[in-house]
Amino acid sequence: MWLVAVSVVAMTAFTIAWVAGFGDQNVPDNTYRTTPAAFQQQVDEFTQKYLGDDGKVHVPPGEDAYLMAQRYGFTPELVLEAGNEYTIWMSSRDVLHGFSLIGDNLNLNLEIVPEHALALTLKAEKAGTYLVICNEYCGLQHHLMRGHIIVEE
Amino acid sequence: MAYVEQLPRSLPRTREEPSRICCVTGLKVYAGAQALTVANAVAAVLALAMGGIFGTLVGMTRAPGVEALQPNAFYVALTGHGVAALILWPVFFEVAAIVLASSILLNARVFSMKMGWSAFFLMVSGGLMLVIAIVTDVRNAVMFTAYPPLVANQIFYLGYLIFAVGVVLALVNFALSIAAARAEGVYKGSLPLLTYGVAAAAILAMLSLASGLVALIPAWLYANGWIGAVEPIVYRTWFWGLGHTLQYVNVVAMVVAWYGILALTLRAGPVNQKFSRIAFVLYIVISLPVLGHHFLVDPSLGNEVKIVGGSIMGFLLGVPSLMHGLAVMGGAEYELRRRGATGLFGWLKRLKWGHAGIAALTGSLLIFATGGWSGTVETTLPLNLVTHNTMNVPGHLHQTVVGGMTLAFMGFAYYLLPMLIRRELWSHRLATIQAYGYTFGMLLMTSAQIWAGAVGVPRRTAEIGYGGETPDSWQLPMDIAGAGVAISGLAGGLFIVIMVMTLLRGKRSEDAARLVPQGAA
């Protein structure tokens, strides 16, 4: 009898997982292998192309963005236009880092691993400055590592 | 199993060893088995003391209202906390349990005392190397996970490896002890339930250590510059083959402690032993692929792999835990009804709630259940986007490993140590206060951590100010968690005091009723 009860609980959990799996917010699985140098080159080319006078990179809608995590910061600072969907590729120059995007009611976390690039696809819904922090321990100044993603109207 | 009976006969078994009959259980206790169990248990308690001090410092730094340590010291304390409280304390206690389960519980001797003491000294040396490496050089503050390309000094890796070799020796001795006991005919039929459970833990430990060697040997070579690189994802996979499987060694050992407390203090067992044995086997079958949940938001693995290996297998792992939880509570209910309890909850009224064992068992069952719940949430693929590397993770693992396992081990130790050294517990009243205090502190701390994780507070971070840019909602839960840490730190310290005072000052006794007081009328 207990076995049946336990199985019902487990099956319910399965069902919830499958339903949740087809929801709107899903884990990106668009990845490729790279090297720190090759990814740095992509980031540099992308930065030069769209660098604005304010020292930030204004990503045109439809273009992929590139973000490098390196002890102890994220480069470049990205500026997105509200209402558009973007794909942000990220990788690490040195050790493992975390990508934690913090905003009003927003909390999204990914792992950044050197030699692997991961693409996050998101829709910039609300204008504002979003904080990006590292949440994988990366060294003695780990708690200072941060960057920004800015969404403009 | 003819080969099992053949094997030990060819080995010399001539040594004579003094023994006594335990006044509580009637089991035959050999002097060697007793000494080895006590030595490992004492090492475990010392490791817990160390882990607890580091942990309290960590918790007091994470509370924004306190911020006890500077960042460098914080990362040292956090690495030391992980190593002492998550590796040394449980593994030493589990080695005490495997010595106990393969000798005393079977009325048998330890197969080889030399091997037993070698294992013990290797584990002590490896553990000391790890701790010394961490506290003497801040560059070794790489967390107990030590993900390359982050590297520590080679002493750190050698400490890990030597400790692991010691555990492997202890496991080999465990298997040979059981084989020898069977050959000598000191027990008949299936292994007793507790030994069976410990055997399941031992099998998982062997798988876990094999995986750990594959992760840590290349990391050691890399730290010395003898190889050029370690693929970070490959390391993470093998490391969690060690790290996560080890948590299921802990879970199985915790369940064994539940049944141990049940048997000693209520003279009760599971209603159906086969049911509990099946649940033990399920742990072995299911727990290995579950390491996948550590990579849910990593690059490189496909979502199909993540859903099957991380999420679905993770949910399945709840099944054996629920089975054991029901078996333990059902066993208590069955025994108390047999003694005349009536009504739906009459059996609960018969329990002595002011009793340390009952308090620890209840706290452990309760907090472990919350840990199963939070773990199931985290292992769900899309939800992991919210919880990954936030305070949710330490919230979950303190519910399972601390509230569940550590509290169960504490409760079990309140009976085990007095029986082994034949001294009464120093203070039952303080032990009861300890168990309730620890339960309350851990519930408060872990609930606040889960809350903090939900609003995005990162784990393993010395400060959460980030130039004042972080939301105000981060402060309160972290301060509440700090209050929980203070309470559980005090209660944890009380456990150490009770253990040490029992060892040194406990009243010598051969009275079963005083060594193991009964937890129900």
Image (tube, coloured by chain):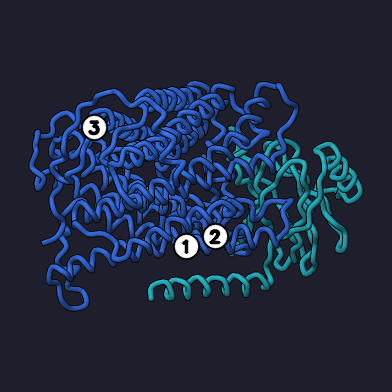
Chain colours: A cyan, B blue
Tell whether B101 sits left or right of B504: right
- Residue under mark 1: which chain is it in? B
Q: What kind of element bears circle 1?
A: helix
Q: Earlier in the sequence, mark 3 or mark 2?
A: 3
Residue at the outermost bottom position: B343
Query: Mark 3 highlights which residue?
Result: B30
- Residue under mark 3: which chain is it in? B
Residue visible at 72% across and 35% down in the picture: A94
For badge 3, the amino acid type reads: Tyr
Tell whether B460 sits left or right of B225: left
For badge 2, the amino acid type reads: Gly
Residue visible at 17% across and 62% down in the picture: B351
Residue visible at 43% across and 60% down in the picture: B278
> Which sits in the foreground, B32 or B156?
B32
Q: What kind of element bears circle 2?
A: helix
For badge 1, the amino acid type reads: Gly
Query: Where does the C terminus of chain B fall, quadrant-wise?
Result: bottom left
Query: Mark 2 highlights which residue?
Result: B314
C-alpha separation, residue under disc 1 versus residue under disc 2: 7 Å
Q: What kind of element bears circle 3?
A: strand
Query: Mark 1 highlights which residue?
Result: B318
